[in-house]
Image (tube, rainbow, N blue to C red):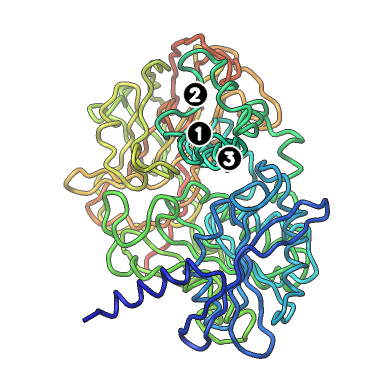
Amino acid sequence: MYSLKMVLSAAVLALLLTASTLYAAEEYAVTVERGVTAKMRDGVVLRADIYRPQADGKFPVLLQRTPYNKSNGTEFGLRAAARGYVTVIQDVRGRYTSDGEWYTFRNESADGFDTIEWVATLPNSNGKVGMFGGSYVGATQMLAAIAHPPHLAGICPVVTASNYHENWTYQGGAFEQWFNQSWTSGLAQDTLSRTVSLNANAMVGALTLPLTHYPLFNFADPSAAPAASSSLAPYYLDWLAHPSYDDYWKRIAIDEHFSDITVPALTIAAWYDIFQDGSLRNYVGMKAQGGSEAARRGQHLLVTIGGHAGGGRKIGDVDFGAAAAEYDENDLTLKWYDFLFKGEQNEFASKPVKIFVMGRNEWRGEDDWPLARAQSTRYFLHSSGNAISLKGNGGLSVAAPTAEPSDHYLYDPSHPAPTIGGPLCCDASHLDPGPRDQRAVEGRDDVLVYSTSPLAQDMEVTGPVSLELFATSSAVDTDFEAKLVDVAPDGFAQNLTEGIVRARYRDSREKATPMTPGQVYKFTIEMWSTSNVFRQGHILRLEVSSSNFPRFDRNLNTGEEAASATRFVSATNTIFHDAEHPSTLVLPVVPGR
C-alpha cells in the first residue's frame, strides 16, 4: 500500500516531466507551461515557466527573474498559483535556458522592465505585478523597480544589497574575497556548460569547476586569475579593476536611485547575512526617499537570523529556539501579496517592522527601523598597554579614559587572522558561516580583546553598531577589523556583527589616500547592525585586528592594488585609547522593559 508521501512524490515527479499538467492544492488546480519565450527590446529571447490557476477570471502576477535556474522555482510556483496568483519564473539573460550574454547587474533594469510589462498582458493577468526572491534575485527586483515599469505594483527583496560596490563586492574598501570568488565560481559552472555545449563532440556537464579552485590572487602568479576568468566570469575581473567607487558602480547603485522606486516593498534581512547592511539600507532609503507616497508609506521590514548563513532554529553553533523555526520565506511572501494585492488584514496590517531579538530568542514588532528609543551609548576601550589576546588586560566601560598607554600588535599578511563564522556565502562545505565560537581567534597575538565585566543585568543592543578607532601604522596602508562578541559564562564567544576599513579608503570610497606611517588617524568602522540581549552574567566583548581572511582579502600593507600585489610587508599597528584619543565602541542600547 502506497503512503501519502509516496503518492505526492510521484505526483511532483510527473509534474516536472510534463510541459503542461494539473495540480490540485488549496483553492485552485494549476496549469503549468514551461519554456515560454519573451523577446526583450534588443531582440534577445528569455524563457520562463508559467504557473496559472485553472479558473476563469483575472489574477495578480508574481514574477521571479533568476540566474539560478527557473526549474528550482517549481515548489513555490505551484503553491502560489494554487493560492490565486499567476506565477512566472524566468531565467535571466545568459543563464540556463535564456539566450544572450550573462554579465552581472548590467541588463536587469531593462530586461526587468520589459518582462514586467510582458507578464502584465498574459492571459488571466489582472495587470498587477509583484516580484519576489532573494540574493541576486533581490537585485533583479531592485534594478527593475528603479526603472519604474508601469505595471509593477510591489516587490519583496530578500537578503540583498543596496550598493553593489559597498555591500556586495567590497566592504569598507576591502574586497569580499570569499563571497566574490565562491559565488562567481558557482555561476561560472553554467557558463562553462553552455560553452561546452556549443561543441558537438563535447559532453555537457563533463567538466566541473570545483569550489576549492577559486581564481585567486595574493597566492601565486597573478596572471592565473585572468586566464581562468576572462571567458567564464569577465565581470569578476572588472570588479578587481574597479576597487574604488567609480562610475562603473554608480550607474547600478540602488541607493543612488531610491527616489525612482514607486512601489511598496517587504524587505527581508537577516542578522548573519552577507547583505544585512544593504537590506536595512534599502528599507530606510525607500521609506525616506521613495518616489511616491505609496512607496514611502508602504515599506515593511522583517529581520530574521541567518539569511545566507542558514535557516531553522539552529544556525552555526547556536540554537535560537522554537521561535526561530517559525520563519518561512515562501509563506511570508504569499502573505505579503495577500495583504498588498488582495487586501487581507494579516500580520502586515499592524506594525511595519518585525525583528528577531537574539539572546531573548523571540520575535517583536516595531514601529520603525532603527528603533527611536535606542540610546546611543559609548563604551570606551581601556588597557594598561597589553590588550593582546584573551591573556591581555583590555577592558570596555562607559568611563572615559584619561592617561593610558596604547596597544600595538604586528600584522603579518602571510599569517592572517582566520575567518571563523560570520556573514558568509556561498560555500559552507569549506567555511562554516553564522555564529561560531571565537576563542580560537581571540587567542592570537595579533588580535586585541576588550571586554566588560560580567553584566549585572540584561542589556539589549538593537541597531547599528560602530567603532571610532584612533590608530597608527608603520605601513602606508593596512586594515582595521572589529567584531562584537557575546561571551557566555561558560566562555563560549558568539560573534554578533563585524566591520572593516581599508586605511587608504578611510576618508572616501571614491579615492584612495595612503597613510603617513606613524601619524595618528581616526577611523570609523561601520560594524553593521544586530539585535541581541546580553544576558545577566554575560560579557560584552570587542575584538580588533587587521585581518579576517578569507572573508576579506589580505591587505599586504604596501598600498598596491590587491589583485596584482605580490610583495608582503608586515605592519606594526597601534591602537590609542587616552583622553586625547578616546577609541569608542558605539552601541544602540534599548532601555529595559
Residue identified by numbered label 2: 216
In which quarter of the view is residue 56 placed? bottom right
- Left or right of residue 441: residue 587: right
In primary-sequence order, the first of circles 1 and 2 is: 1
Residue found at x 37% / y 58%: 311
Residue identified by numbered label 1: 181
Helix, strand or loop under label 3: helix
Quote the CA–CA distance across marks 2 and 3.
Answer: 27 Å
Do residues under tags 1 and 2 come within 8 Å of each other at their CB atoms?
yes
Quote the CA–CA distance across marks 3 and 1.
Answer: 24 Å
Helix, strand or loop under label 2: loop
- Left or right of residue 454: residue 398: right
- Left or right of residue 227: residue 328: left
Helix, strand or loop under label 1: helix
Which mark identifies residue 197?
3
Residue found at x 18% / y 48%: 489
Quote the CA–CA distance across marks 1 and 2.
Answer: 8 Å
**Residue 100, relative to residue 583: is it above or below?**
below
Tag 3: amino acid: Ser
Tag 2: amino acid: Leu
Tag 1: amino acid: Gln
Q: Residue 116 placed where, x, y %?
A: 73, 66
